[in-house]
Amino acid sequence: MASSPPPPATDLPPTLPASFSASSSPSFLHYLRNLGSKAPKTMAALYSSPSPSTLSPQPPGSFFALTVLTNLLNEIERCVVLRMVALEWTEDSGITERDFNSWFIGSKKDWDWEKLNDLCIISLNPSRSSSWFVKLRSPFHSSLRSALTSTQKHPWSLLPSAQLKPSPTPPPTLNELNAYTQNIWNGILHYLVGTKNTQEPNPTVLRFLRETGLMDVDAKTAGTKREKWEITKKGYDFMLKDVSEQVWSFVFSYLQTLQSTSSIISTLLLLTSLSHCTLSEGYPVSLLTKSHKTLMPKFKDFGLIYYTSGSPKFYPTSIAISLIPGSLSSSCGHLPSPTSVHSLLSLPDQTKNPTLNIIVQTNFTVVAYTSSPLHLSMLLLFCDKDDYMVLPNVLVMKLTRDSVKESFKRGIKCSQILKFLKKHSHPLIADADYRIPENVQSQLHLWEKEEVRIKCSLAFKIYFEEEEKEVERDVAGWAEERGGLIFRGKGGVVVVKYEIAEGAVRFKKRRVREWREEEGGEDDMIVY
Amino acid sequence: MSQTITIVLDLAAEAHRARLSTVDSKGRFKGPALIHLHVIPSLKVFLNAFEAANPSSDWSLICCTNTKVETVGRTREGIDLDAIMRMLDDGVKKAEVEEDAAPTTLASSEPKANPNISISKGISAGVTTAVCRINSYLNKNLPGGLANRKRKHETALSASVSGADDGFTNLHKNSDETKSQNNVIESRILVIQTGEDWMPHYNNLMNCAFAAKSAGVCVDALQLFCSSDKKEERSSMLSQLTHITGGLFMRPPTPAGQVHGALTQILLTVYLVNKSSRNVLSPVVVETVEFKGRCYETGNKIDIGFVCNLCLSVFERKLDTCLTCGSKV
């Protein structure tokens, strides 16, 4: 269902690059490696970022170094880097080539020089002999040492309540925090899908939905006063993603709009610091830097932090903690899901914390334990809209050929449907070898293959006389070089793609003229 | 893959080692490493590095003296130092009582140091406790118990982590991704021995080794010097223990090689690499295993000896009654 257009931009971030697509936002590693020509200085500034106050003895740069180490390197790279942390070098010394190679048994296939250089972790220097030596770059080295030798696990000190001004509202519980994040994202997805009576998200989110191609103007109402916006193919793809991927898309789009290096640094440091927080712990707002305080409203819009105006503390949500996973924090950043059948069947309050648990049966029936209208909308993307039951705590729907093919036309792939169903599979069958029956999986793949079994494209037939076999061979070769040859028949027929038809005809004319001249014949034929 | 490590830290010989610690002419500490000054700080860095190297991981610490074995709890900052210091003080006081009870000689004005207080009597109890906890944890979390484990050194996790009885409290709970991917847990034990071997517990330690091996648990060991004399003997018990379970055994090259950050470097270089990665990343340790038996009475190495047919204790001289089990030979 179409929805009203977002309000005009006022103090919103600048426009996103045209090539950006929310459905294909690159990973955190990719983003760091592609910071451009300023990458070494930016990375050095990130690693060596100082502590903002004496009450936070652990500098945020050390948390950034830990995040890079834990999140972006594989196990072998982490072990090797940690081996090097305890060592000290002078400017013109390091681990020699011979010693470094002796650390590996066999080939160094798990060691990516390029990645470690892009992330400004190691430096490779020529030595006086013909070999080289390697060492850790000093901003990363000192930050990581600081992180490993510190006992502080949190980026901001947990000040006692006596040192803070009183909070107007009581601190949120874990369920309230999760419900808060869920409500924000449910609201965005409801708006995306076009559910009736949905509150409009804030302008930042609306602009993101528009500029990333998740929503587009309805063709029927384009240019009119009642211009409406509706979900696109990319939007459907976006809806079926994991919440963390969706949030990262938003965050990445925001990072793309930042112009100055200092703002990029500030945002990345805040993101990595949040990933080292503990869920349901409140951190003092007074310990944030000025730039971080300006980011608070945007992060609140994305559901990354929870705070109320006037409150001395802010609370990172589970999404913020798991956005860049791999911290030393003991908390698990996942949204909770009920693990007992009893709690599922006992009509939980889905409005506060909606969960989705799916069982797919061998007769293509989808049983979804949920009562959230958003989950119903999401399942109706690929289930039969005309034949489903809505019970107080369960939905019973069917996967049919028509409904699945309809979803393919919207741009949803079979792999996305299967991933969605597997991700939300019921805990009772979560450990089974096949969470989705084999026959259902196979049939979905077959239906998808039907979409690409026959591909129609415009073509052009070129006929040749019996004596023009040489010309026919040359034209076929010419078309094949350009990737346009579709078919070459025995009866003097060559079929080429329509795009190169004109060129093929001209080539044929020229070849026929040349052939005729060679044969000594007159050029009196009509070439077609 | 989730990783767990249980550290068995021997506190037994601390009094003896503190007495024998020396400094060189420039005032620098020469060794041996003291628990509160050198070992604990290095261990903190090692555990932080372990958590950084293995995002899905957990650790527990078991401290043992000659009379007590205790699992040390955790604080927000990591290791509960107070609990360790209490055990240390307790151990030092008991060592002083033993020292006072030692006979003095007419020749020396100071009481002769009791050699027994340099012996690690609690190691086998500590390793036993570690193996039992890991076994209990794996049995709780593996469907059908350890009998259904799929591979030799790996076990599947199908339910949430059990409570604090096992010492592992930080592995992800209720993680849909963990359950759905049928996560694998690799457990290992790191034994840090600070005293000498206690031969009467040889059988106990070997039984622990076989139990650990059947549970797929790898045991690594680090032996620290008791004094600043680098001619101290290597621990044959620990080297055999690690050999049976496929682990690593190492002793720093010199007593000074375990202080001033050198112990941190040893822990990070040798013991940080998980067992599954040791076929890719060399542990940089080459230690030979001594398979010679030791006399249960004198502790001497022997090639040929007399064996009790009941408890299999080995002696270098023929005895009428076995000193270990008391049976008539």
Image (tube, helix red, strand yellow):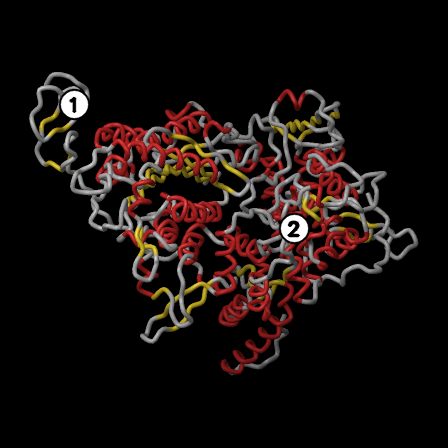
Residue position for label 1: B323
Quadrant housing residue A369: top right
> Which chain letter matches label 1?
B
Horizontally, residue A394 falls left or right of residue A73, namely right
The amino acid on which the numbered mark 1 sits, given as a three-letter code, is Leu
Residue A523: image location, x then y, percent: 59, 80
Q: Is residue A380 visible?
A: no
Q: Nearer the viewer, residue A170 or A485?
A: A170
The amino acid on which the numbered mark 2 sits, given as a three-letter code, is Trp
Residue position for label 2: A248
Residue B111: image location, x then y, percent: 24, 39
Q: Secondary structure at mark 1?
A: loop
Q: Is residue A475 above or below residue B267?
A: below
Horizontally, residue A330 falls left or right of residue B113, namely right
Cα distance in 3D space between marks 1 and 2: 69 Å
Q: Is residue A225 above or below residue B57?
A: below
- The crowd level at tag 2 (other Cα within 10 Å; few <14, some 14-19, many 20+) is many
Quadrant housing residue A407: top right
